[in-house]
Image: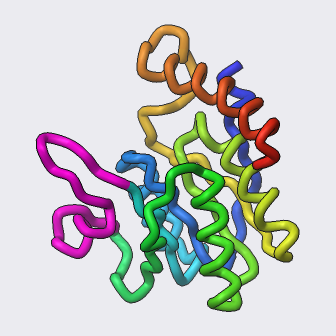
Amino acid sequence: MGDFLVAREPLQPTDTIIVLAGNSIYRSQYGATLYQQGLAPRVIVSNEPVRTHGLDSTWWELKQRGISSIAVPDDSIMPITEVSGSTFEEAQHSRDIMRREGWHSAILVTDPFHTRRALLTFRSVFEPAGLTVIPAPAEGSKYQTDGWWHDPDRGIRVIQEYIKLPYYLVKRQI
């Protein structure tokens, strides 16, 4: 069950790397690794609310204040400034940036359990616009799918994905 959620395809150079925030440091670290390997000259990072310990902010605000970081030069980062409430909205915002910039291809970085739905969602938004996307499960993520039934945190994420997949299908977001 867990392995089905992980989508992998051979990576190749693209116009950009899209890092879905998801409150996961593993995603941004892996996106930076792919950038440093020369797979794309730019990185789109989705913005999201960050609420913890009385702090109510967003990833981009924290990045601008030097509290959050990604090992990519600032001039190579293209933030999604709008706060996305879902993977579908992240796909729409990413598509709009790519069209505006004249980009055609992207590598999509997210945690392994999230790659199948994210890929289906992004392709449903990208393909009508003539854009392509390749999935890249974040290596080193603690959210791997092996042994998910032994780890409550992994188990919750796997079960949530199996709830979200049919929901996205019914909403025609995949």
- Numbered circles on residues, count: 0
Q: Does the magenta portion include 38?
A: no
At x 34% / y 83%, what residue is drawn? Answer: 74
Q: Residue at x 72, y 58 (%)?
A: 122
- Whether 67 is drawn above or below 135: the answer is below
Residue 128 horizontal side relative to residue 163, left or right: right
Q: Residue furthest left?
A: 54
**Toward which corner of the image does residue 53 lie, by quadrant?**
top left
| Residue drawn at the location 42% of the way across and 63% of the way down | 47
Could you tell me residue 45's position as x and y percent?
Answer: 46, 67
Residue 131: where, in percent of width, then height?
A: 79, 74
Residue depicted at 39% across the width and 88% down the height: 75
Q: Is residue 154 above or below residue 80?
A: above
Residue 165 position (above or below residue 96): above
Residue 56, image x, y percentages: 21, 52
Q: Is residue 27 above or below residue 131?
A: above
Give x and y (percent) for residue 11.
70, 62
Q: Residue furthest front?
A: 171
Magenta segment, which residues? 49-70
- In the rendered structure, does residue 69 fall within the stretch colored magenta? yes
Nearer to the camera, 57 or 104: 57
Q: Where, quadrant-wise, is the N terminus in this rendering?
A: top right
- Relative placement, left or right, of 100 versus 149 is right
